[in-house]
Image (spheres, helix red, strand yellow):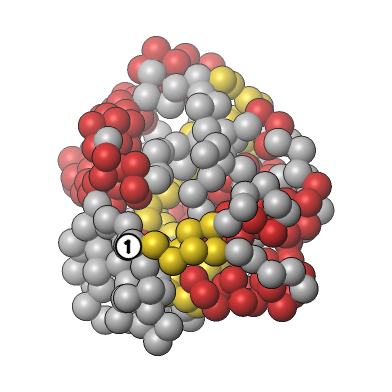
Amino acid sequence: MNVLITGGAGYVGSHCNNFLNQKGISTIVVDDLSFGHREAVKQGTFIEGDFGNKKLLTSIFKSEHIDAVIHFAALADVADSVQNPSKYYCNNVSKMINLLDAMVEHSIRHIVFSSSAAIFGEPKFVPIDELHRQLPINPYGETKCIGEKLLRDYGKAYGIKYSALRYFNAAGADIDCKIGESHNPEHHLIPLIFQTALGKRKKMFVYGNDYNTPDGTCIRDFVHVLDLAEAHYLALNYILKNDTSESFNLGNNVGFSVLEIIKTFERIANIKVAFEITDQRPGDPARLIASNKKTKQLLNWDPKLTIEDILNSAWEWEKSRTY
């Protein structure tokens, strides 16, 4: 089987690329390296380019026998999306239309889509199941919501079969520390904790301690990137085998607050982390926790790695990272 992976040099995409190759699947990775890293693509064929470039897509689909697409490529900074919505709609929506059109033109009917828990907005209940109403509170979430609508419409009109995977908080690193999380600028909680612990930052900021949560800080559901990689593999097999479309929430069914994550790391590493409480960020819901019941039932996916596994693997990566 040949799979095109857009954004496969990014954080989750590179781990998924490794996982698929370990399962005997051939991959073609397309990434413009604006946020991804060439060093992260350890296996498969790499093509540097824009996934929304129609000429590039036509060339790939004509020269390679592509059986399915896994679409990671997207801008994903919530705060930045509030300040710069135009580039998010251009990259995450307009270019996705180009990708889907190219798939239709070349009779490629199966796609796994990297969606997000941001589609739900401020939850009415937790844990959040797949039927929870979708009301994004930031442009990033809106673009992912539109992406899922595109898939539904292309499914009805052109027979596209899809799996939309709503990540909650991806974290952790490959166990052998050859690949891991690396953003510039960094905006994810766990790497920011590590950078502060290593003295790369004088302190980190905790955005708000006045949320309606036990300690006042945001609560998130963290899922190990290796568990996510497995979920993509299972979702791909599911839609290919059943020729159907489904959406799945990917999380651990349990949440940890920002302060709980900091304290857990301090206990594991025996290091104090300097932080300052500041104002809430626009677009941050108080709680995001997944119900993964449907994912377990249909995909037989059961995340195996704990928050300690997440922190330990990511910490080892941070101390020895190569990019």
Q: Residue at x 23, y 32 (%)?
A: 86
Query: What residue sits 43% from the left and 83% below the top?
Result: 215
The residue at the point 71 percent across, 32 percent down is 39
The percent position of residue 246, horizontal first and vertical second, equals 34, 60
Say which quadrant the C terminus sits in: top right
**Relative to residue 122, is residue 64 depicted above or below?**
above
Across and down, in percent, residue 167 comes to 44, 60
Q: Is 303 displayed left or right of 89 in the figure?
A: right
Which quarter shows the N terminus? Answer: top right
Instruction: Evaluate whether residue 5 shows in this view.
Output: no
Q: In the image, what residue occupies the spot 62% across and 52% down?
A: 202
> Vertically, is 315 above or below 146?
below
* Residue 317 versus residue 258 in the image, above or below: above
Q: Return the x and y of residue 103 as percentages of the image width and height.
A: 36, 30
Circle 1: residue type: Gln
- Which residue position holds label 1? 280
Decide if residue 260 is in sight here: yes
Residue 166 or 267: which is nearer the viewer?
267
How many numbered marks, from 0 up? 1
Q: Seen in the image, is 140 located left or right of residue 137?
A: right
> Relative to residue 261, is residue 278 depicted above or below?
above
Element assignment for label 1 = loop
Residue 119 picture quarter:
bottom left
Quarter occupied by residue 198: bottom right
Binning the other alpha carbons within 10 Å of mark 1 as few (below 14), some (14 to 19) or many (20 upward) gives: some
- The location of residue 267, given as percent across then percent down, is 72, 78
* Depth order, front residue of 128/35: 35
Image side of residue 151 versus residue 314, left or right: left
